[in-house]
Image (cartoon, rainbow, N blue to C red):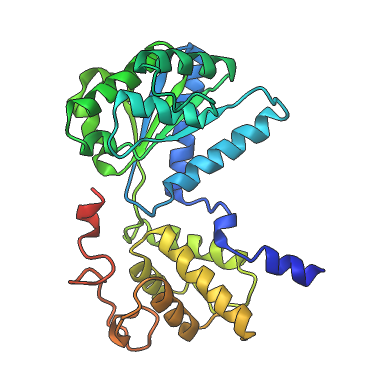
């Protein structure tokens, strides 16, 4: 029975919240802004911006879990509403996305105007006692350069005027550009958290080593030391400092060990996991876990992190 249970719920690091310094800082700031809203009774805004793969969505899930745990069995209460902003945002389709997230049966009603949808959202937010609204993929408000997107941004501002809720914009680094294009929105979202990838410096080296050690302690199989100096460099180059890639590589390594009944995670297993999850065509000298690796960043042409910082900006 226990063996069957393990097969049904295979190990994944994604089942664990791994607290990095970036995550700790963002959670602390989110709790502070949320607390300020509660005390003042006035809507406040927070921007959490950073590249894809750093763990922004996981951070929000953890905050939701913490709030739900604190509120207990208040079934009528919904502390956090998470909404994904449409790729081509308008007042009406953003309202539809919010109503859908609120489980409104009339969310898709085409006969309802944007104004009617707005009024219904305010009513539902109030009745469900929503305290935090998270608007994910907020860079769409910047990318979609039409009046509709700016109207959608103004619509968010109007919602803040009519509620006493914390609003959180989560997106890529360019999300902040929305605030510079809209002075009133900038005033409401004066708090910003830069949630960046790990960049190895003298100051962050120990932090990255501690992160790898925490991850190693979670693994259900034996493993070589992950926080040894050379391994730190290998993992940083293999992941580009993005926790999503660390998880992909190590989840795959665990699977390889368990399914082959190997002794544990070795450099060879990690090299195979890197090929499986990050770069299938990696030459030996460009695979961070191969003994022949040249220890140069994987940012060249057709390499995994080519132009990554430019694309994620």
Residue at 32 percent across and 19 percent down: it is: 155
Q: In which quadrant of the rendered view does residue 189 lie?
A: top left
Q: Is residue 164 visible?
A: no
Which residue is situated farthest in the front direction here? 111
Residue at 28 percent across and 24 percent down: it is: 153
Q: Nearer the viewer, residue 8 or 165?
A: 8
Q: Nearer the viewer, residue 152 or 195?
A: 152
Q: Is residue 116 above or below residue 200?
A: above
Which residue is situated farthest in the right direction here? 1
Instruction: Give how far across and how far down residue 175 sits, in percent.
Output: 27, 37
Residue at 47 percent across and 12 percent down: it is: 40
Instruction: Give how far across and how far down residue 210 sits, in percent.
Output: 50, 61
Instruction: Give how far across and how far down residue 157 sits, in percent.
Output: 32, 18
Q: Is residue 23 above or below residue 179?
A: below
Q: Is residue 307 above or below residue 186?
A: below
Q: In the figure, is residue 234 to the left or right of 181?
A: right
Q: Is residue 132 visible?
A: yes
Q: In which quadrant of the rendered view does residue 192 lie?
A: top left
Residue at 47 percent across and 52 percent down: it is: 20
Q: Quadrant of the N terminus?
A: bottom right
Question: How many numbered callouts?
Answer: 0
Instruction: Give how far across and how far down residue 193 sits, in percent.
Output: 36, 37
Q: In the figure, is residue 251 to the left or right of 311?
A: right
């Amino acid at each position: 029975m226990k063996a069957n249970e393990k097969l049904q719920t295979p190990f994944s690091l994604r089942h664990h919240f791994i607290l990095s310094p970036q995550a700790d800082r963002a959670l602390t700031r989110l709790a502070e802004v949320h607390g300020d809203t509660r005390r003042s009774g006035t809507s406040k805004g927070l921007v959490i911006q950073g590249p894809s793969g750093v763990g922004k969505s996981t951070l929000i899930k953890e905050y939701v879990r913490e709030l739900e745990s604190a509120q207990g069995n208040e079934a009528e209460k919904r502390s956090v509403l998470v909404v994904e902003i449409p790729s081509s945002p308008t007042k009406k389709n953003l309202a539809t996305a919010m109503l859908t997230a609120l489980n409104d049966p009339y969310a898709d009603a085409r006969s309802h105007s944007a104004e009617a949808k707005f009024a219904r959202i305010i009513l539902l937010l109030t009745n469900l006692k929503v305290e935090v609204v998270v608007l994910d993929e907020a860079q769409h408000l910047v990318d979609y350069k039409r009046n509709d997107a700016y109207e959608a941004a103004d619509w968010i501002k109007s919602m803040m005027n009519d509620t006493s809720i914390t609003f959180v914009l989560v997106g890529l680094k360019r999300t902040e550009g929305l605030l510079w294009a809209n002075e009133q929105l900038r005033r409401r979202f004066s708090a910003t958290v830069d949630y960046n990838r790990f960049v190895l410096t003298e100051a962050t080296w120990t932090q990255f080593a501690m992160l790898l050690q925490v991850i190693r302690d979670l693994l259900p199989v034996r493993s070589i030391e992950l926080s040894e100096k050379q391994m730190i460099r290998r993992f940083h180059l293999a992941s580009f400092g993005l926790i999503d890639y660390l998880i992909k590589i190590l989840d795959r390594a665990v699977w390889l060990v368990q399914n082959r009944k190997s002794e544990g995670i070795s450099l060879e297993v990690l090299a195979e996991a890197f090929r499986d999850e990050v770069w299938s065509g990696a030459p030996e000298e460009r695979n961070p876990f191969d003994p022949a690796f040249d220890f140069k960043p994987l940012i060249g042409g057709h390499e995994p992190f080519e132009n990554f910082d430019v694309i994620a900006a």
